[in-house]
Image (cartoon, helix red, strand yellow):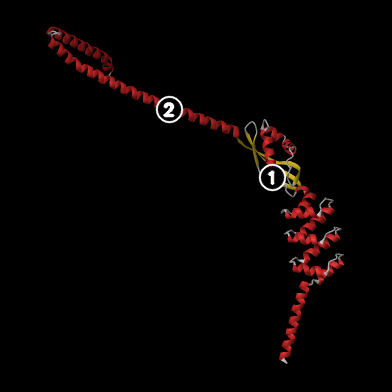
């Protein structure tokens, strides 16, 4: 009795497993949903999708959505896009949204945009509802040297034809920032920019900054302008400090040259003093030689000594007379 019950339970389990395998490889429910939705897909095609590792549910739901929206989609094209790594549901959503919004978008273009790494459904939505991009603070300097910090809001719309190979938001922001810097830099005064901020928008918008990008710029609005530093005054201060440092360096150079010249003159004076001392040392020798040779007499020698004594006395009297007033004052 127990053996019979166990055998019956085994048969039931085996039947359940077989039914699960059958319904997995033969999605009857999915085939019936496609049939009542007007999509012609055979059970054999669904089974072959399983063997090709293609999820049948994604393909069938995409075909149902496209058929209900009045689109003509082919199973082979959807399978090929899915096997290529594309996002089939987003492509179909984008095609349906584009048809409702009267945006020209075919299946080939949509799959190319999707495989390029862009969100094709978001691009279609951006074509219907433009997107506002806030630029980071852009710093520029007017001709009068005043720094201005501007923030802009760029309203863009996706350009479906340029999504493949077109530049992204970073390029648009970079070009807008460059245009703002150029416009402020060409202004004679920062007051002109503060009085007419819309002039920046007009100048930047007329430059055609959206060329070669995946977006179409609709408007550029200056949201905020702040006054920064006085760059002109800072540059003048830096220039004055640089000139002062240069002048100090030149003065230090002249002082060093003067010190060197003074030391050189002192060395020359010492040299000349040494020569004088050497010459004075030769005088007694010359006088002795003159006495020895008879060129100088004894009386002449004594007269010379008297003259030297008189000269020394006069010098001492003169020096004493020059020091007298200072001693009296003391």
Horizontal and vertical percent for residue 200?
72, 37
On the image, numbered disc 1 is attached to which residue?
171
Question: Residue tagged by mark 2?
Answer: 253
Q: Quadrant of residue 49?
A: bottom right
The percent position of residue 287, horizontal first and vertical second, equals 16, 12
Q: Position of residue 199 (x, y in %)?
A: 73, 35
Quadrant of the snapshot with the N terminus: bottom right
From the viewer's perspective, is 204 left or right of 35? left
62 or 197, which is in the foreground?
A: 62
Query: Element at badge 2?
Result: helix
Count of picture labels = 2
Q: Dot 1 surroundings within 10 Å: few (below 14), some, or many (20 or more)?
A: some
- For marks 2 and 1 on the same chain, the one whose residue lies earlier in the sequence: 1
Q: Residues within 10 Å of mark 2 (few under 14, many from 20)?
A: few
Q: Is residue 121 visible?
A: no
Q: Residue 69's quadrant in the figure?
A: bottom right
- From the viewer's perspective, is 163 left or right of 285? right
Q: Is residue 46 above or below residue 179?
A: below
Q: CA distance from mark 2 to mark 1?
A: 54 Å
Looking at this rendering, what residue extends furthest in the bottom direction? Answer: 1
Q: Nearer the viewer, residue 60 or 217?
A: 60
- The mark lying in front, picked from 2 and 1, is 1
Camera-side residue of 323 and 211: 211
**What secondary structure is found at the residue carrying circle 1?**
helix
Quarter in which the C terminus is drawn? top left
Query: In the rendered image, is residue 203 in sight?
Result: yes
Give the residue at x 41% y 26%.
Answer: 255
């Amino acid at each position: 009795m127990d053996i019979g019950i166990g055998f019956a339970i085994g048969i039931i389990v085996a039947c359940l497993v077989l039914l699960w395998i059958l319904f997995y490889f033969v999605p009857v429910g999915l085939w019936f949903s496609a049939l009542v939705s007007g999509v012609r897909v055979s059970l054999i095609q669904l089974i072959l999708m399983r063997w090709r590792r293609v999820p049948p549910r994604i393909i069938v739901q995409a075909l149902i959505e496209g058929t209900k929206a009045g689109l003509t989609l082919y199973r082979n094209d959807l399978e090929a896009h899915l096997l290529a790594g594309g996002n089939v549901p987003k492509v179909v959503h984008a095609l349906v949204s584009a048809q409702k919004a009267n945006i020209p978008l075919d299946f080939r273009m949509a799959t190319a945009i999707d495989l390029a790494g862009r969100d094709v459904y978001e691009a279609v939505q951006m074509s219907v509802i433009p997107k506002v991009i806030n630029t980071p603070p852009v710093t520029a300097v007017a001709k009068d040297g005043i720094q201005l910090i501007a923030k802009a809001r760029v309203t863009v719309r996706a350009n479906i034809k340029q999504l493949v190979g077109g530049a992204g938001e970073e390029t648009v922001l970079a070009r807008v920032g460059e245009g703002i810097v150029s416009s402020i830099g060409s202004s004679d005064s920062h007051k002109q920019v503060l009085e007419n901020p819309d002039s920046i928008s007009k100048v930047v918008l007329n430059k055609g900054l959206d060329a070669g990008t995946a977006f179409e710029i609709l408007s550029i609005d200056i949201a905020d302008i702040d006054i920064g530093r006085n760059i002109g005054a800072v540059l003048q201060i830096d220039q004055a400090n640089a000139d002062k440092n240069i002048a100090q360096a030149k003065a230090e150079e002249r002082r060093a040259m003067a010190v060197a010249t003074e030391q050189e003159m002192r060395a020359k004076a010492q040299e000349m003093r040494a020569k004088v001392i050497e010459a004075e040392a030769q005088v007694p020798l010359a006088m002795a030689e003159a006495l020895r040779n008879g060129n100088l007499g004894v009386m002449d020698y004594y007269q010379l000594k008297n003259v030297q004594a008189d000269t020394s006395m006069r010098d001492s009297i003169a020096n004493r007379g020059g020091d007298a007033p200072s001693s009296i004052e003391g």
